[in-house]
Amino acid sequence: MAKMTDSAGGCVFRPSAKDLCAFLSDYAGWLFSCGATCVRLEKNVGRIASAAGLRADLSIFPRHLHITVSDSCRSFLFTAVSSIHDCPVNFAMNTRLSKLSWDIADGNVDFVCARRELEEITTAPAGDNGRLPLMVACANGAFCRLFGGDAVAMAVVFVATFAGFIIKQVMGERRVDQRVTVVVCSFVSSVLAAADGLFALGSTPSIAIGTSVLYLVPGIPFINSFCDVVDRHYICAFGRLMNALVITACLSAGLCGGMVMMNVGMF
């Protein structure tokens, strides 16, 4: 389908208020789910609405989004409620969705193309999953060294992280609850890392066990929670903080379970 263009050569982005409300509802739900802060959500949604000559008011809650689209005089109102998608943090999707808002604002895409691109972004595969476990394992091995681990501990942490992250990817693809996934992955990683001490392979076994689960620490939810507090989105900040604390508790439960199973002293 050919793009509609204005006299200046830019694409015409003029959907009806009802169509725009439905589009923004889907857009905002995915943007929030993939790890965007509330302030980014407000700016991107406002940018798209302004490109259409309309106004969008956004109410953000931990599990739902309420979007109302109107004109400047509020002579008509269309409201949509969107559920937050249960998906892991995805910076690639976050970046592409933000770029889409700028493409719309700059007149590079019309509404039909924007809807098609949104569908492509949200249904695209996660990327090169083959190299990601290797990169995460290398990073976690580097953390082990940073905390004083020896070469053997680094190797053990590398193997434990690689195995745990593969399991994390498989369970994520099968849409297993994130909390269950964290418990299982931390348990597996801690059991494998305990080999350093059980077989007397190195001189820093406690560091190997402690750093083997660092890849599961929910850093992004903690950071987003702080950012939302700064921007006075207190409800979302509290929700994200509680989610991060629950994930941390699941990580600790899996780690302790692995240490108990391998008869490794905690103190």
Image (cartoon, rainbow, N blue to C red):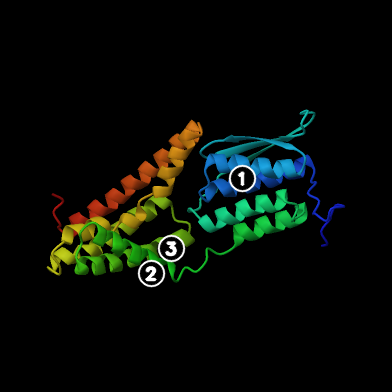
Mark 2 surroundings: few (<14), some (14-19) or many (≥20) residues within 10 A: some
Q: Is residue 258 visible?
A: no
Mark 3 surroundings: few (<14), some (14-19) or many (≥20) residues within 10 A: some
Name the residue: 33% across, 48% down: 250
Residue identifier under label 1: 28
Name the residue: 67% across, 51% down: 102
Residue identifier under label 2: 134
The percent position of residue 16, horizontal first and vertical second, equals 80, 43
Mark 1: which amino acid?
Ala
In the image, taking residue 90 as reference, residue 104 lies left or right, namely right
- Badge 3 or badge 1: first in the primary sequence: 1
In the image, taking residue 191 as reference, residue 240 lies left or right, namely right
Tag in front: 3 or 1: 1
Q: Is residue 132 above or below residue 13?
A: below
The percent position of residue 208, horizontal first and vertical second, equals 22, 61
Q: Is residue 18 visible?
A: yes
